[in-house]
Amino acid sequence: MSSGTHLRVHQLITALWNKSFQVDLFSLEGFSNLWPESDRKRYTYGKLHIFPWDKEIGRRNRPRPGRERRLPDLTSEAMRREFRRFFANGGHDFVVVSYAFWTKLIDGITGVPRIIDLHDCITLNEHQRFGRGQFTLGRMFQDEIQAIDRFDFALSISEEESLFLQPFCNHAVFVNLAVYFPKRFSEIRDFKYDLLFVGSENPFNVEGLHWFFYKVYPLLPKCKIVVVGGVADSIKDFPGLKKFPHIKNLAPIYQKSKIVICPLLGGTGLKVKVAEALSFGRPIVTTRWGLTGIAEKKDNGCLVADEASGFADAIYRLSQDDALLVQKEQEACTFFEKKFSFGKFSRRLDLVFGNADSMEDDADSCSISYG
């Protein structure tokens, strides 16, 4: 998966398919996916409809300095019309929209539960990316709340954002639905790397790694660091650093890395990279931003430090103190099973879609339109 967003959608579709739902997907070509023929053929969960993305919509909604921002509407009349046609032709039992940018896709769609997958709070995300003290929250936040409240259910990846957003919504029922991973704990302790960071080339990852290498790295003794994912292309070379922009199987990298780092300085939603590291039982050194979306801030396999000196000290303590390392590994394993197992995800999903295995109707009659 190229990003946490893609992983989230893939997991939701796969979980619903495993519950005997057909999942028809309405997607865009040219927004963040190119949809080559090989990808189209791999989509076997239901019908796939690809709509060409109008780049002019993105240009019109690009944030501008000094402007009081509104929640961008990334749909067009042509897109909304095509989505209604796609929905009407499928006999769908549910409709799911991913991100509030696309809320107007449900215009005119009634008679079925309408579900929004939030991913994160858009207003907070935009504030952190573009505002930093100059961003006016009011108009965009009001737009976002009104958009969410048009739906019957809101799937929230972040426990904290559920607590924050739900009191403002009169209609939408919030369901906490974090990501899930298979349990991949290993007793192997043949570490090749001291530190590991995994992430796509999004602004928060780039900013965080720059902070780490320019502020924290000089305070560390000689160590071997590996950076995996698109973000690797955004940092220069440093002694002891290996970069892998593209890698198919992350398991060997995680199993050979002693400590995972998450040196983020901002962000919203849930840090999927943290959940993924926990699935391998790896201890994590993170800033408080790495625990965004997780209500429990202690006994979770993480050491937390926001200052460069504290971050470096946490890494040093974990690398030198085997008892502390084992303690954090055990915490990581326990916390993962509590929060990010497939069983947890599946049970939460049933709160919205019901238990398909126990439905009296033929499972083949259950289908979903996912936009």
Image (cartoon, rainbow, N blue to C red):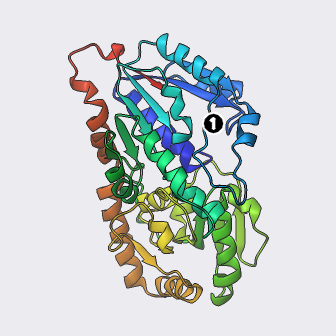
For numbered disc 1, what is the local secondary structure? Answer: loop
Q: Position of residue 347 (x, y in %)?
A: 27, 41
Say which of 355 and 102 sits in front: 102
Q: Position of residue 123 (x, y in %)?
A: 53, 54
Residue visible at 65% across and 20% down? 78
Q: Is residue 200 left or right of residue 298?
A: right
Q: Residue furthest top?
A: 89
- Answer with the quarter of the image where residue 218 lies: bottom right
Q: Position of residue 80 (x, y in %)?
A: 58, 23
Say which of 6 and 18 sits in front: 6
Q: Residue furthest right?
A: 236
The amino acid type of the residue labelled 1 equals Leu
Residue visible at 71% across and 35% down? 57
Per the image, the residue denoted by label 1 is 74
- Answer with the quarter of the image where residue 234 lies: bottom right
Q: Is residue 251 visible?
A: no
Q: Position of residue 127 (x, y in %)?
A: 58, 61
Q: Is residue 273 above or below residue 13?
A: below
Q: Is residue 162 visible?
A: yes
